Amino acid sequence: MRVLAPSPQDTTIVVCGTSTTLNTVPVTGYSNPSWNDGSTGTSLTVTSSGDYWWQVTGASVVTNGNFSAATTSAATRGFTSSYTYMTTSSPCPGCCCGALSSEGTYSVNTNPHTLHTQFTAFGDHTTGTGNMLIVNGAATANVTVWTQNITILPNTNYVFSTWVTSVNPANPAILQFSINGSPLGSTINISSTLADGVWQYFTTTWNSGSNSGTLPIALVNQNTAANGNDFAVDDIVFAPVYRQNIHVTLNPIPVLALTSPHTACGIYDLTKTIIGYDTSTYNYFFKDSSGNTITPANAQVLSQSGTYTITEQNKVTGCTSLPQQTTITINPNPQKPGISSS
């Protein structure tokens, strides 16, 4: 069954507070959720306003991207190459150092050192004990190291990734992937400061547009140095990806501050207890001790003692403060003394 890539849409989230938790949603046929900060999992807590994204990937359309399949023929390897394929038992008349002594040769093996005595011994990226693609770079630029036909869907985002490393420290390779003859991402300049066997990650995204069906994806080496220029490649992935962009706005929660409890005679204006009372910025809500709502007008002419609850709401953001309580004691006004004539 062919799984069609869904069309992502941008989402806007507006939250009152200093943080919020973003969550992925299931997408049929896709898995391995990841976030813009490199973390994985189905949720991410953010503490600032800004733009975020999560993505899930479908199955890779690359055959034998981890080079684990049998290597006796190009058909079982799943790819072809303009380089010459060699094994540890391949005839190599006049070779100085092993099967990959000559430029423009490659093999699939678990250890570079078994193919060239000047290659460093280390394990593959996938498991540390599996196969990898091992290459003695050609002295001619743009010779195809690896190529494979892949099937793609139209109007679909894809993620491409691979792991690379030098097998000899001299003159690190300069690699370039392409799809249908067009460069796929920037060149991969294998680091000259990292030790051989330290795998370096490369990834980019690509949109198929109107393209569909079968297209070739290829790897070439643009370094032409005969000395060194030797490298390994592992875990090539080209997979449909669904990405959800999220714009987050975190609005502050108002902090309502009240003065100390008050005693008044006759009536009391409850708004006088609010520090920084500002009706141009905030709406205010009042309740009595029984939870009954008091209108702002009535709150200004209280005639009964009690504990009152006040909250404030920012008129623009809609964010509401935590409720605050204050106790008001209202004493009756003294009666005028009676005057009589005798």
Image (cartoon, rainbow, N blue to C red):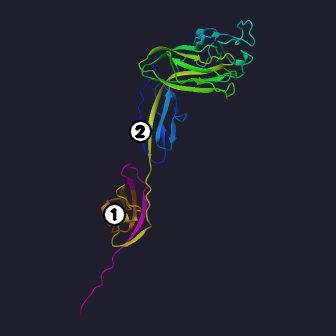
Element type at marker 2?
strand
Work out how far the residue at label 1 is from the one at label 2, CA to CA, in angstroms: 38 Å
Decide if residue 315 is on the left or right side of residue 89: left
In which quarter of the view is residue 233 placed? Answer: top right
Q: Nearer the viewer, residue 307 or 118?
A: 118
Q: Position of residue 40 (x, y in %)?
A: 55, 33
Q: Is residue 311 above or below residue 137?
A: below
Assess whether residue 337 is covered by the magenta stretch: yes
Q: Position of residue 203 (x, y in %)?
A: 55, 26
Mark linked to residue 12: 2
The magenta segment: 312-341
Decide if residue 311 is on the left or right side of residue 340: right
Name the residue at 60% across, 19% down.
Answer: 66
Assess whether residue 269 is covered by the magenta stretch: no
User: Is residue 126 in view?
Assistant: no
* Label pair 1/2, CB-CB below 8 angstroms: no
Q: Position of residue 2 (x, y in %)?
A: 45, 18
User: Is residue 199 in view?
Assistant: yes
| Residue ranking furthest to the left | 341
Name the residue at 59% across, 18% down.
Answer: 222
**Few, some or many residues within 10 Å of mark 2 (<14, 14–19, 20+):** few
Q: Is residue 50 above or below residue 304?
A: above
Which numbered mark, 1 or 2, is in the foreground of this view? 2
Q: Nearer the viewer, residue 148 or 131?
A: 148
The tag earlier along the polypeptide, 1 or 2, is: 2
The amino acid type found where label 1 is placed reads Ala
Q: Residue under label 1, please give it.
A: 299
Decide if residue 158 is on the left or right side of residue 76: left
Q: Nearer the viewer, residue 111 or 30?
A: 111
**Few, some or many residues within 10 Å of mark 1 (<14, 14–19, 20+):** many
The amino acid type found where label 2 is placed reads Thr
Element type at marker 1?
helix
